[in-house]
Image: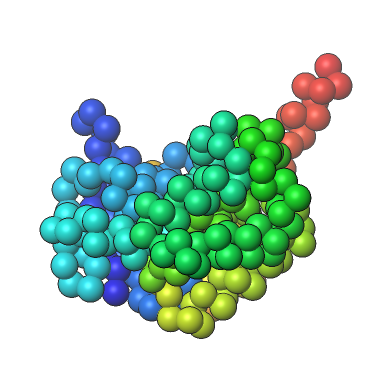
Amino acid sequence: MLELKGVTKKFSVFPVVNHVSFSARPGEVLGYLGPNGAGKTTTIRMLAGLLEPTDGDILFEGSNIKKDPFAYKRRLGYVPEQSEIYPHLSGYDYLEMVGRLRDIPESILHEKIIEFLRLFDLKTEMDGAIGSYSKGMKQKILISAALLHNPDILLLDEPLSGLDVTTSLVIRDLVLRLAAENKIVIYSSHVLEVTEKICTKVIIIHKGDIVADDSVENLRTLMHLPSLVEIFSQLVVQEDTEAAAREIIDVMKA
């Protein structure tokens, strides 16, 4: 189990994540939702070991991840929100670098890379510089890098960003299959319709605080609302979106 216990992250004196506690278990897909600036990516980066919490603890299998961060990261796959990867490397070279850092035996690494590139329709582009790739192609490389070593924990921060419809559907089904393989999957996205279909439960964070933590079905029942979009709007959205849209049209026509 992966647990956060009273985790806070402050930048200067301002808390971006405020005493957040939740757990994610093998075999479930945990949706982690919130508007821009709510603290989602900061939480994910702490779970990835890239940021140190100001306060609180992150535990995996009962031990604080700070005790042996290298052992923890060996079992972790992470798709970041921003596709910041070395633009001068080719897709193949980048995955080879990641595979070697992950200590994947050379005897199987080449075949694994070629298969990932084939399955994501990147084989013909594998020798081209990543800097020449589209956003969707870069995202496929990041997803491949996260899965290459068969991790036990997957942190997916906006994994559908830039992907075409077909690949988005593949990733949706892949996430469900990963959960069926008893992986821990934390899925952060703005695409609420997909999140509603694949997540075992959802956590909604707003201004650094958790405002909901339950299954979508229970939240629908408790709030008497038909969908995750409606639930999210009720808990988080603080402006009249229709009025805002009308005002934008008015400015266009001025």
Q: Nearer the viewer, residue 205 or 140?
A: 140
Image coordinates of residue 149 in percent, x first then y, are 44, 65
Within the image, what quadrant is residue 4 found in?
Answer: bottom left
Q: Which residue is at a point 72% across and 46% down the rendered structure image?
A: 125
Q: Quadrant of the C terminus?
A: top right
Does residue 95 appear in the picture of this structure? yes
Q: Nearer the viewer, residue 212 or 52?
A: 52
Q: Which residue is at a point 77% across and 22% down the rendered structure image?
A: 251
Q: Which residue is at a point 38% across and 78% down the rendered structure image?
A: 26
Image coordinates of residue 83 in percent, x first then y, are 54, 41
Image coordinates of residue 107 in percent, x first then y, are 47, 66
Q: Quadrant of the N terminus?
A: bottom left
Relative to residue 252, is residue 166 depicted above or below? Answer: below
Q: Which residue is at a point 52% across and 51% down the rendered structure image?
A: 95
Left or right placement of residue 130 versus residue 7 in this view: right
Does residue 216 appear in the picture of this structure? no
Instruction: Name the residue at the top extreme.
Output: 254
Q: Nearer the viewer, residue 162 or 29?
A: 162
Within the image, what quadrant is residue 20 found in?
Answer: bottom left
Image coordinates of residue 100 in percent, x first then y, are 41, 54
Relative to residue 216, is residue 65 depicted above or below? Answer: above
Q: How many marks?
A: 0
Left or right placement of residue 74 versus residue 248 in this view: left
Instruction: Name the residue at the front extreme.
Output: 107
Q: Nearer the viewer, residue 83 or 90?
A: 90
